[in-house]
Structures are given as C-alpha cells and as structure tokens.
Amino acid sequence: MDAFAEAIDDQMARVSLAPAFARAEPLKGAAVLYAKDLDGSDAARLLAKLCGVGVTTQMFKKYTGACKTSPVLVAASGETVEGATEILEWTLDKAKAGNASVTHPDACDANEIDRWVTFERDVMRTPVLTSVGMLSGTIAMDEGAFEAARAALADAASETNARLGRSRFLAGDAPSAADIVVAATLFPAFAKALDPAARDALPNVVRFMEEMAAHEDVKAVMGKLRMCDMIRMPKAKAAKAPKEKKADDATKSAPGAGKAERKKETGLGLSTKRNEDFGAWYSQVVVAGDLIDYYDISGCYILKPWAYAQWEYLKEFFDREIKELEVENCYFPMFVSASRLEAEKDHIEDFAPEVAWVTRSGNTDLEVPIAVRPTSETVMYPHYAQWIRSHRDLPLRLNQWCNVVRWEFKHPTPFIRSREFLWQEGHTAYSSKAECDVEVRQILELYRRVYEEYLAVPVVPGKKSEKEKFAGGDYTTTVEAYVPGSGRGVQGATSHCLGQNFAKMFNIEYEDAKGGRSLVWQNSWGFTTRTLGVMCMVHGDDDGLVLPPKVAPVQAIVIPIPNSKLSDEVKQKMDGTCYFTRAVAFPTVFLATTFLPAKCSISMSIIAI
C-alpha cells in the first residue's frame, strides 16, 4: 500500500489533462471506484481516474489480511493477479501506461499546473485527510493533531484563495489537472472541517468550488465509474458460536465466568497499548480514569472530582509549606489592560501569540481590548510599586491560586498543554539578591518534594540555559521529569530569580535603612495541573490509570488473615504485616497496584476505608 501511494505521488507531478477533457475510459481488468462528482473523492483516486483507471483501495476497506487466501483480480484479457498489494501495483502500472500521451490544456501555464499539483500533495493533502478523517471517525481523534491539521488547512486554503483572486483557475483561464486535484482535496474539508465563518473568509475558493462542481468537462472526467471485471475478496472464517450451557452448568460456572463478555458490553478498558501509540493511550487513560471530560471549546478540559481531589492534595501540601516560609495568599483580577500587558515588551514577547483578548461586551465593541492574564507579573507589579515604600515593607511574599489562559495552538493535551489551566504563582520582593537566591532554592526543593514524595515521580532539579530561561528574568531553575513511554523530558515546575529587571520597568523602589533609594530584588515561581498529567504518563500502564498512594482519593487497607491450614512458620511471617494503598477503587474502571507495607495484628479483620 505504501509503495502504491508513493508511486501515485510521483505520477501526480506529471499528470495533466488534454485540452478537450476527453473522457478517460477505464482499462479492462482494473478495479475502479464508484464516485459522484466532487463528493469526497480524495486526490489519489482522482489522479488515478485522470490516468485512465480507478484505484482499488475501497475494495480492500474491510480486508484485514487475516484470511487464509488472498484477493484475486481476473482481467478481461485472462490475466490473473493475486494479493492486495499486487493488485494495487498492477492497477498503477496500467494507469501509467494509459497516461503516456496526455498534455497540458493550451489555456494553462504548465509551470503553474506543476506548482499547484505539488502544493496539493506536499501542503494541502495531509491536513485535509487528517482533519476529515478524525471528524469522520476513520482516524482516531487526537486533539492536538486535529488542531494542528485545521490550522495548516486554513493556511493552505488562504493561499489558494489569494491565487484565485488573481486568476479564474489555478493555472489560467481553463480548468486543469491542478484545479481538479485541489478541488477534490478541498471539497470534503469544506463540508466537514471548516465552519461557515471560515468558508465566508474564502470567497474565491467558494466560487472556484462551485464552478468546478458544475463544469461539464470536469463532470465528464469525474463521472460515475465502472467496477472492474472481477475481484474475488476472501472472507474470514466465521467464529463458531459458543455452545449453550445447560441451566445446571450455568449454576456451576466458576466465579468470574463471563468477565470478558461483560467487559465488551460496558466498553471498559483501553483499546491502545502504551508502547504502540502513546498519545492515543494517554488520551484514553485520562478519560477512562474519570479525570477529565472534553469541553466544546478545543484545548479546554473539565477537571472531574477525581482529578480535582488529587490537585487539592498537592495544593494543601504546598500551601502549608509556603506559609511556613511566611508567604501569604492573595488574589488579583484575571483581566489585564493592554497598556500594562505591553509595558514590558521583552517579557510579554514569548506570550504574545497565546494572549486571549476580550473585544466585545454584549453587542458593543470595547473601546480598548482587555487581555486575559497569561501570567501575572504585569498585573501585580504596578501595585507592588505602590505598596513598597520603605525597607520596612520588605520582604513582600505573595502567592495566588488561580487560573490562567494561554491560547495554545501546539497540540493541546489534557493537563500537559491546555488553553486554560490551574496553577499557583508566587511573587516575592526582597532587599538583596542573596535573599532571592535562598528562596529560589527553597521553592525548587518544595517542587521536588511535590513530584517525588506525593506523585512518586523522580525529577532532576537544575538551571535553565539562557535561551530557555523565563523572559525578563536573571535565571530560571526547574525540576524536569522523564516520561519513559514517550522517551521525552517534561518541565515539571519552575522557580525564577527576576533580579531587578521588573523593578526597573515598574519603578519598584524603596527607601533603604541609610535613607537612599534602592530597587527591590524579585522572584516568581509556579507549578500547574500539568503535575497530574506527568503522574499519569509515568505511572499508567496498559490496564489504565495508576495513582501513587498519597494522592489517591479513595483509600483501602488489605490485611492478610491466616487460616488453620497454614504452617506455624508462615503464620509467623505474616504476623504484624499488612498492605495498604491509597490508590484503589477507581470510580469506573481501574484498580491500582501500588502497595506499601504497614504493621498491624493478624487478629484484625479486613478494613476498608
């Protein structure tokens, strides 16, 4: 199949139409498809039709290769071809032979035909097939890949729209192979992947699609196709129906009989292995594990009680620890004026593409757009300048638990990369850099404890490079985790020393003990609900979600109770030992497997908490 697709791609760059758009008759023995005008035929099928033969792909839609015999094509000439791959290659050879004498239309620029055929193949086809395939269910939905495909599709359609504003067709005043291939590719995307607003922004493409669909010469080329002479498709041997059990046998069945059938009925469990498709596996884990639900705004997710309880465990620990460091909690508004947001251009530059703007109130446009905070430096520091007047006002240590919005376009993923997420952000001010350096390390140590003591995820504390550090800061420290399933590292949490950069920008200065004026030294630090995603990625397995004991909302204790048949030696080994876990009884699906030893008396009964 891959060899066939590659050969079709090579042929695409050379294919074109005769000036009169002569109808191409299918060659005898070729397996062809049934298509109607522009209703969803992909570019490969259209290209093969232009070559004079249809593609057999659809014939093998339900063929899995699990049959003992192979499919067989019998041509009118008596030639026999056996095997799915062999039939496809035979069809392609016939297509090449039938297209040998085709030339470009006289009214078209051959170079433009080549350019747009190549554009369709290299730029347009993949995002169209990905977005349409995921919407139709033929490809497993991946939120990040889907958004990336739609963005690429919009860019390709915009470029096509610009070209069609300068020329009636892509290569001149008459439709060519380039127009047919591009139209065939775009048509299903217009129907499924682009909403009305997106189509309204592409008036030239809409006009082009309508003309192509109604053009008689085009319809002649893309008319209804005939089936081939004969293809014998083998059928897999039907599974034998299980014998009916008698009533007596049913009552004697061992406990747990029929579990497979019940699992099939309820749809529980995962359909993808972690080492086969890590992204699809992770998406199934967080949904089937009852952690999140998808929302109707892409990149935004609902944290269900099971996930939020885990976040609260982390929040309670960290909040308690920072209060020991005399950090106080507060809350600042989520909206930021444009003037404040743009006051520190170097800092906001990294966030600029992700900033969400409020531009309308009801039916009235706002005179000045308002941003939704991507981070809070520009929200809080103008007030720090008002509050800090003297060295007696220092240190100022504030933290807020809140949400932020970053309009991500790079593969949104639950917990890991979302457009809205929960976090804590600490912002402190000191009179010296030495105090800042001490706090940066203290906070980094707390982040390490969050991951290693609560989430059982080993991390590597360290310092970011100059290129990767927080925009506007002196240096950035981080805890980095490793995800074995993907083979990648992930940033767990960061603690930044901002130096005096923001103090200079927002004029945060104070009267020191000697009566002079000095700028404050500042830190900022934060961790997010990404922690939960890292935990799921590291501990989850092919059975689903596995939770570390300290963050599992449901607790249980398992106590072994010896019976009279056990030897005294075994009883002695069991005495005083039990196993407990805080990671059992997942609401809908899974049972965690992390057990830790504890002590109790063997005379106790089994206890469930």
Image (cartoon, helix red, strand yellow):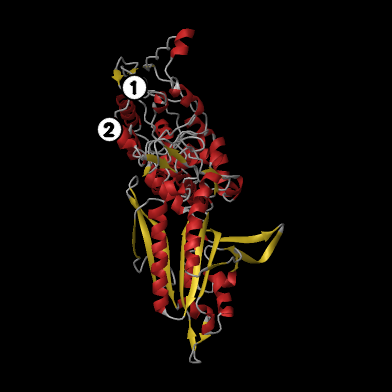
**Badge 2 element:** helix
Q: Amino acid at mark 2?
A: Glu
Nearest to N terminus: mark 1 or mark 2:
1
Give residue 12's mark: none
> Residue 337's image quarter?
bottom right
Q: Nearer the viewer, residue 94 or 573?
A: 573
Q: Position of residue 421 (x, y in %)?
A: 52, 55
Disc 1, SS: loop
Say which of marks 1 and 2 sits in front: 2
Residue that protrudes farthest toward the right in the picture? 363
Dot 1, how many residues are within 10 Å of its Cα: few (below 14), some (14-19), or many (20+)? few
Residue 546: give x, y in percent of width and height. 41, 42
Q: Is residue 29 left or right of residue 198?
A: left
Q: Amino acid at mark 1?
A: Ala
State whether residue 436 is above or below residue 90.
below
How many numbered tags mark residues here?
2
Query: Between marks 1 and 2, how big is the CA–CA gap?
Result: 54 Å
Look at 47% across and 12% down and name the residue there: 251
* x then y, percent, for residue 383: 58, 75
Q: Residues within 10 Å of mark 2 (few under 14, many from 20)?
A: few
- Please say whether residue 171 is visible from this viewpoint: no
Residue 563 falls in image quadrant? top left
Whether tag 1 and tag 2 are in contact, CB under 8 A, the answer is no
- The picture places residue 196, in percent across and down from the top left corner, at 61, 45
The image's mark for residue 66 is: 1
Give 194 or 403, whichever is nearer the viewer: 403
Q: Residue at x 47, y 37 (%)?
A: 607
Say above or below: 385 vs 253: below
Of 67 and 588, the residue lying toward us: 588
Residue 41 visible in the snapshot? yes
User: Which residue is disc 2 drawn over?
Assistant: 569
Q: Quadrant of the N terminus?
A: top left
